[in-house]
Image (tube, rainbow, N blue to C red):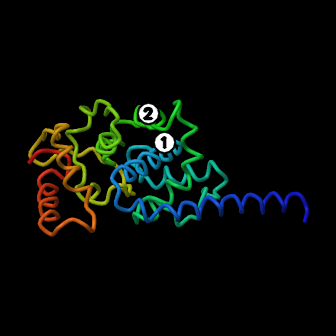
Amino acid sequence: MNQTRRQRVDKLEKQGERFFEAIRHVKTELFSPTDDATTHAINLGCLLIGDPKIGEPLSNAWQRFLEKYDGVAYGPSALSPFQYKRNTILAARFNRELVLPHYSGANEQEQFTAIFAAVPPWLLWFTHGDFTADVLGIKTPDLSSVTGFVRSEATFERWPVLPDGMFEPHPWPGGYAEPMTAGEMKLLRDSTLLLTDEMTLRERRRAFDIYRKYGDGRKK
């Protein structure tokens, strides 16, 4: 086997090890809001590397991120953070070691803080990244320039999956609506993101009642 082929095989073997390590962690992360927030933060970090822009789908930025690393995607192309939660978790797991070193910090919490400091307000608002920051205990940047624009309840419902569409700065119907306070966001988080198989039907109904009231990130 020549050197070029050996290097290629070594590269594929390393990717394979990381891929199967990611799979081993997926099952335990499916119902953890903190791990979901970590997944969301890492994938936001990937998007930033791909230079997301207003007026284009976020999937374009994701593709640019992949192309910066020879298109081998640091993972199979099926590992998209835009469709299924399982694949969203796998994408973050697979790319974690690649992405976090791009952001300064002595530990992961500081690196996540650096990611949120770099995320433009429109992207944070569009992806419900302010909710992610709250779960991780990170101070949310000033979003006053974007909270007057519509964002989707469906996007929040699928969190930490990213929306693959584009941010369009359309005002809320009927005018500006006040965003949730930190206390209300905590109530929403505690009531909706801790959904597990152990919850009773009554507890689940209460969670979704609160979601319907606050799920788009503004008071109703």
Q: Tell me the quarter of the image containing the N terminus.
A: bottom right
Q: Is residue 123 left or right of residue 198?
A: right
Quadrant assignment, res 177? top left
**Residue 128, numbered circle:** none
Up-down relation of residue 13 to residue 115 (above or below) = below
Q: Is residue 36 left or right of residue 3?
A: left
User: What residue is shown with label 2?
Assistant: 118
User: Which residue is pictured at 17% across the width and 64% down the height?
Assistant: 204
Percent coordinates x, y for residue 220 in the rendering: 8, 48
Q: Do the residues labelled 1 and 2 touch (CB within 8 Å)?
A: yes
In this view, the residue farthest toward the right is: 2
Q: Is residue 85 left or right of residue 174?
A: right
Query: Could you tell me which secondary element the residue under label 1 belongs to?
Result: helix
The CA distance from mark 1 to mark 2 is 8 Å
Q: Circle 1: is it few (<14), some (14-19), or many (20+) Cα within 10 Å?
A: many
Percent coordinates x, y for residue 195 in the rendering: 25, 61
The amino acid marked with disc number 2 is Ala
- Between 218 and 184, the one lying in front of the other is 184
The amino acid marked with disc number 1 is Leu
Q: In this view, does 77 lie to the left or right of 211?
A: right
Up-down relation of residue 118 to residue 219 (above or below) = above
User: What residue is shown with label 1?
Assistant: 48
